[in-house]
Amino acid sequence: MNDGEGSAGVLAIVDGASSDKAAWRLDVRGTVQGVGFRPFVYRVATELGLNGSVRNAGGHVLIEAAGDRAALTELARRLAADAPPLAHVREVVVAELAAIPPSVAFRIERSDHIAAVSNEVPPDIAVCADCLAELHDPADRRYRYPFINCTNCGPRATIIDELPYDRSRTAMRGFPMCPECRSEYEDPTNRRFHAEPIACPVCGPALSWSGGRLGGDAHGERALAVAEAALRHGGLIALKGLGGYQLVCDATRDEVVRRLRELKHRAVKPLAVMVADLDAAGEIAVLGVAERSLLASAGAPIVLAPSRADSRLAVAINPGTARVGVFLPNTPLHHLLMNDLARPMVVTSGNLADEPMSIDDDEARLVLADVVDGFLTHDRPIRSRYDDSVVHVVDGDSTMIRRARGYAPAPHALPVATSVPLLAVGAELKHTFALAADARAVVSPHIGDLENAEAYAAFTTSVRRLSALVGITPQVVVHDYHPSYLSTQYARGWDASKRMEVQHHHAHVAATAAEFGVDRPFIGVAYDGLGMGDDGTLWGGEVLVADLQRYRRIGRFSMAPLPGGAVAVKRPVRMALAYLLGGETFEPASARHGSAELWQAAREVLARVDEREFAVVGKLIAARLNCPAASSAGRLFDAVASLLGLRDENTFEGEAAIALEEAAASSGECGELPWTLRKVDDLWVYDVRPTLAAVVDSVRGDVAAGVTAARFQATIVAVTAAFCDTARTATGIDEVCLGGGVFQNRKVADDVMATLRSEGFTVHLGRRIPVNDGGVSFGQAAIAAARTARR
Ligand SMILES: [Zn+2]
Ligand SMILES: [Zn+2]
Ligand SMILES: [Zn+2]
């Protein structure tokens, strides 16, 4: 209400004699609403003896304060320096007021603060240090209360029914506050002032246990004790977590971990392990400063890191790999469990095979009752499904692999605002979608692989829900070229005039560009598994000159057939045969000269491969039957991993590529393998023949697989630098955006970035947006926004 220019709030006039006194208006911008900022300002201002007020206004916080200049200066400093953990102060604009408000105690004004927060759904936040201290304090009324929270922590996105965010529109609606909670909720000096999910043992949600097939029920603290006893004795339980049901068991007992793998039909993909604290995390994983700070952050993600050889973890946690996903408790319930049990626990999504995890109590029971030893659950409903997020550190910085709990659906800025509300439906694997309006895009949490009816249902439900929540009613749908993606099929249900197609790899590099606010032309390097190209072939090793509207393909990797299509994606050994025996790589020239020799080499190097698979692949390639051609970087990594004897099969996406990366990590720098770039039909093509010939030679010559793997990765880095040099020479552009799942390879990403920087390029890698297909929806949204923008 007060703009400082003589409106009603300003009464007293500055006394000329006391120029050490002043009145300031401080406009605080950044993430300052819904994060306990006003109580914080109240405390600091009161402490400094200032009078005045604080209120929310249109997304920022406005403070008017009067008192000693020194105190005002200190207030301005502390606004940024001591801000609450979840606040991010971008700037504080200070204006001197001509008049000083009357000397009344500092107060928080009752602004309609929530309504001003423009439809932002805040992410869930890991339990804070203050709440933890209370959780473990026997004298506190919330001692061991599994749903303790405050304005600095607790559930948000997973409990919201609709916005504005306040208790009556959340899953807490069914829990009327007791008088004590209400007085905290209404007290501006209290840490729980307007903490919407505020609760205590008197008025809040409570735990319950039901013994599944073993029978036996319990409630409250007793429920927790029974669940813990089951876990201590090697049991497997279903736990109602923040964003869905989870499966939990002792991570040091091989037997129960194997049982868990069997029922999830998950052979070897590493299982995430939760530990009580950073010290315990350090006992199972090798952690740097960046990893530690991520583990302890408000998002509390699963952090991928090298596993320690001397850890207590069961072998079945991460068989055949030297990395482990570790995370810290994010809810008070997880804290209690981890502290009481004092051992690493598997905490993984509560689903069988690949369908989305259950969030509904009845559904969870239906799916899991026969396979777990009991359910530790509670009566606070879960409104939206949020898996645990996964990150790792690349080039010293946090990089998102799976963006869900703790991060989504916080909005991302778009470099170019869209003139029409959009729905970008993403791709297929690691699926997400994005909603965009104006210069803001909201990316959904990770949904899973959009390959079955359950995932499709979760996707369509989530579109409706998130669209209603954030108030974006899309008028245009944006989708991939690939006709068989379920996301594309969903989009085709829209009127043709409201659809827009975006090429897969353009979306990948645009996602990175948009994250970094790049709306100029850039060089886009997309190294990926597979995506539909604009020429009807599958792409995946692409160099584009692009902006947010268009692209021109200027380079690619060699093409190879995918013998059996999707089967080849699951069978790296088929790709090894395909690169050696078929496709562009060895014809037309070498098909005449070298095929017999290559066949011989392949037989020798891949002697372990079944005779029949050899014959089938040979026939498919010769007949060009079910052999789509692909210029994929991901498939090349698969082929090399198989040639080196590291993996012949992908039981999960990226398995062979990870094996290659890990093998390489055991070797130092050992130079490149041979490679060439040559011009084919106006495109620069990385001709993989000399590289693969050298890989075959190294296997025949008994060179350690790790050495060749390291040399192969160095080759990819050198090829990338050559591509970018070529592109810069042709266009004068020296800004590079990297995208695609191959850049989840830390060594390749680190070295590509370092090499390009040393050659004078500005390089960006997706950080908050995953470089894998989880980032495609954001890229589609950024492109569609730029194309529809009014200029
Ligand atoms: Zn808290
Ligand atoms: Zn209460
Ligand atoms: Zn992709």
Image: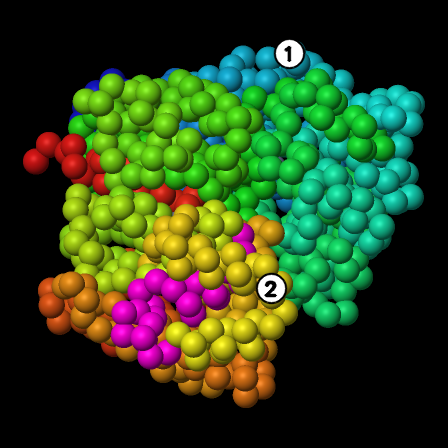
Location of the N terminus by quadrant is top left
Task: Look at 53% across and 68% down and name the residue there.
Answer: 641
Visible residue check, residue 683:
yes
Residue 130 in the image: x percent, y percent?
65, 41
Q: Which mark is residue 611?
A: 2
Q: Quadrant of ligand 1?
A: top right
Check disc 1 and report its element: helix, strand or loop: helix
Task: Look at 16% across and 63% down and name the residue there.
Answer: 681
Q: Residues within 10 Å of mark 1 (few under 14, many from 20)?
A: some
Q: Which residues are magenta?
A: 570-594
Q: CA distance from mark 2 to mark 1?
A: 64 Å
Q: Residues within 10 Å of mark 2 (few under 14, many from 20)?
A: few
Please say whether residue 568 is one of the residues in the magenta stretch.
no
Q: Nearer the viewer, residue 789 or 665?
A: 665
Q: Name the mark nearer the viewer: 2 or 1.
A: 2
Residue type at mark 1: give it. Answer: Gly
Visible residue check, residue 540:
no
Q: Nearer the viewer, residue 483 or 29?
A: 483
In the picture provided, is 512 more to the left or to the right than 596?
Answer: left
Q: Which residue is mark 1?
A: 174
Q: Nearer the viewer, residue 790 or 558?
A: 558
Residue 572 in the image: x percent, y percent?
52, 60
Please say whether residue 593 is one of the residues in the magenta stretch.
yes
Q: Residue 439's image quarter?
A: top left
Check disc 2 and report its element: helix, strand or loop: helix
Classify mark 2 as within 8 Å of ligand 3 or not, answering yes or no: no
Residue 682 in the image: x percent, y percent?
14, 63
